[in-house]
Image (cartoon, rainbow, N blue to C red):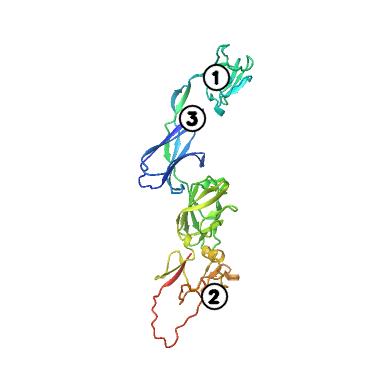
Amino acid sequence: MSLVKINCYTNNYSSITGGLRASIYLASEPTAMLENLQELTPPHNARLWSFTGLLRDDYIFKLEELDSDGVAINLLSEIALTPTELDTNSYKDDFQVIVGSTNGIVDSATSAIFDGSDGAPDFRSWDVTVTEMFGRGLLKKGVDFTFNKTTGLFTLLTGGSFVGGQYFNFHFDQQSSSESTGVGTYVKRVVNLITSTTSLDSTYLGSINIVEVQSSTATPIVITLPDISTVSDGVDMSFEIGGLSGCIKFKSSGSDSINFPYPSIGANYFYATNGESFTIYKFNRSSGVYEWRLRNVFGNFTRVGEIVPIESTSRQGALILFGQPVNVNQYARLFDYFKNYFSGYTLASFDTTSDTERLKFSDRGTGGNIDNFHIANFFNCILYNRNGGWSIGDSEDNEIQNGSSFTLYGRVVNNYIIY
């Protein structure tokens, strides 16, 4: 059995105030961590990370920055390792087995297992020469005994069964071996371009994904995440939203939970829009309890529905509150916020003519307006702070009485709502 030891040298990371995690993966299973070493407190000086007892195979080494909760937040290095061979000779010292004393061999049996289990010695991968001490002397392989070097099974063919206190001497033949010097190459993350509704599978894990909106007014592209039970803990995918102005819907497979403030913690979907980006990863909260979580979030995710008064005629990522009809697909996240997740909010009718109702967002229309809804109309509207006599969302008509002698000062701004 040819084993290798992998040594990976990393430079100084003096600017990192959190922890570091070095981990090893099989190249054939790049999402299943085999082993990891952690250095949780700085300073992070140049050092050697060693992984021993690995089968000869191709591996991937990753070095990641950890936050205070031990969650990987930044991939610092990813290296593919292919062991090379240096011809050497391997030796193993003779081993004396005593029936009834050495684990794995017992009185009255005719066979014994020497595979390293349950305290038994491990003779696997070696060709052996066996001598019965104080008895028959040198035993002939194939006549007096057999030995399976794959399983470690030693079987007597002649001489009856083992006797308590009986000695056998195992001599291990010299064998050619190889030592890994290792060849490392930097691994580039796979970059995918997604332009249509897609159900993600394991091939997307660890990748960078650019999702582009193809039509602002068409039904949003839906990205379905992989079945979370098939994903290794901590494995991530990153997404960047581009293309036209519009929304992309991300949803989990089945009832898998997404722990993110929008639309609500524990929901199983969320929207993203043009210019936003995030990384999503699996977290194992407890035995059998998994959830998706987001990090490195850039965009308006947590500000949807926020009103921003500014002295400008436009604002990136926001709509002016002027009562205009807009497309429900293009602004799906904003409509979903008021329709489903703004507690206590009641949408106005699309065709309402009430001045006070037009201060609210409307439901979608019917017929030719089935894909539209009205933005609230805050034109010539004064926003009040709530007092004891009003409830959030109340509309109040106030007018300045004739003969009033005070001057009302104001500043002209546009009110926008973040979508």
Q: First in sequence: mark 1 or mark 3?
A: 3
Where on the picture, by quarter, is residue 344?
Answer: bottom right
**What secondary structure is found at the residue carrying circle 3?**
strand
Which is closer to the viewer, label 2 or label 1?
1
Amino acid on which disc 2 is placed: Glu
| Numbered label attached to residue 338 | none
Check disc 2 and report the residue beneath it.
Answer: 357
Check disc 1 and report the residue beneath it.
Answer: 97
Amino acid on which disc 1 is placed: Val
Where on the picture, by quarter, is residue 352?
Answer: bottom right
**What secondary structure is found at the residue carrying circle 2?**
helix
User: Which percent across, then down, holds residue 168?
Assistant: 55, 17
Instruction: Using the rendered image of the protein, determine whether residue 76 is visible from the camera's viewpoint.
Output: no
Check disc 3 and report the residue beneath it.
Answer: 3
Q: Name the residue at 51% across, 65% down.
A: 334
Above or below, 271 relative to 232: below
Which is closer to the viewer, label 1 or label 3?
1
Amino acid on which disc 3 is placed: Leu
Which of 330/41 is in front?
41
Local packing at callout 1 (Cα closer than 10 Å; few below 14, some 14-19, many 20+) is: many
User: Which percent across, then down, holds residue 396?
Assistant: 50, 78
Q: First in sequence: mark 2 or mark 1?
A: 1
